[in-house]
Amino acid sequence: MFVRTPAGRTSATLASVALAALLLAGCGHDDDPSVATPSTAPTSAAPSSATPTAPTPTVTATPSASASTTAVDQQITVTIAKKRVDPPTGRITVGKGKLVRITVTSDVADELHVHGYDLGARLPAGTPGSVEFRADKTGLFEVETHESELVLFQLVVR
C-alpha cells in the first residue's frame, strides 16, 4: 500500500531515500557502493592452501572470457582467508578505457568496494563476488572490503 505525500511522492520513494542515506553513512567515505550480486563461480578451481602463491596480484592482460560472456581486458583475482589478502596488497596499473573485472573470494561474508567508481559486490563466505567496469577515470583508487576493512589493492588507472 502506498500513501501519497503532499509533494506527490509515495512512501516507498521516501523509504528509498532513507535507505540511500543509510548506505552513504555506512561507508564512512564520500562515495557510495552500488552493491551487485555475486557472480557465478570462476571456471578454474580455487588454489589449495598448500600451494604457494606469487607475491603479485593475478592479472590477465589479454582479452578473455571467464564466468560471463563479456571479454575483459584485465582480470584481477583476490582471495581472503583468515584476514590475509592473497596476493598481498599492492598496486595494479590498468590503461584508461580498459574493461576490468575484479573477482574476490572471502572465507567470511563481506562486501567488496571500489572507491572512486562507486562499485561494490556482496561477498558471501566462500563464494566469489565480482565487479566489472570500464576504467574511464584516471587516478589511484582503493579496492577494499567493508566489514573487515581490508585494503585489497590500489588500482592505478593511466
Image: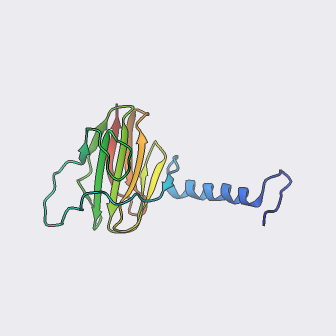
Which residue occupies the foreground of this view, 16 or 82? 16
Residue 119 vertical placement versus 109 (above, below):
above
Q: Residue furthest right?
A: 6
In the picture shown, does residue 61 fall above or below 39? Answer: above
Q: Position of residue 6 (x, y in %)?
A: 86, 54
Front-most of 99 and 140? 99
Name the residue located 28 percent from the left edge and 68 percent from the top edge: 82
Q: Position of residue 28 (x, y in %)?
A: 50, 54
Which residue is depicted at the point 33% across and 44% down? Answer: 154
At 18% across and 66% down in the image, what residue appears? 49
Residue 92, located in which quarter of the rendered image?
A: top left
Screen quadrant of the N terminus: bottom right
Along the line of sight, the residue nearer the viewer: 116 or 66: 66
From the viewer's side, name the closer residue of 72 and 118. Answer: 72
Residue 153 at x, y percent in the picture: 31, 48
In the image, 12: left or right of 157?
right
**Image colouring:** rainbow
The C terminus sits in image quarter: top left
Asked if 3 appears above or below 151 in the picture, the reply is: below
On the image, the x and y values in percent for residue 123 come to 40, 62
Q: Inspect this view and state whether residue 28 appears.
A: no
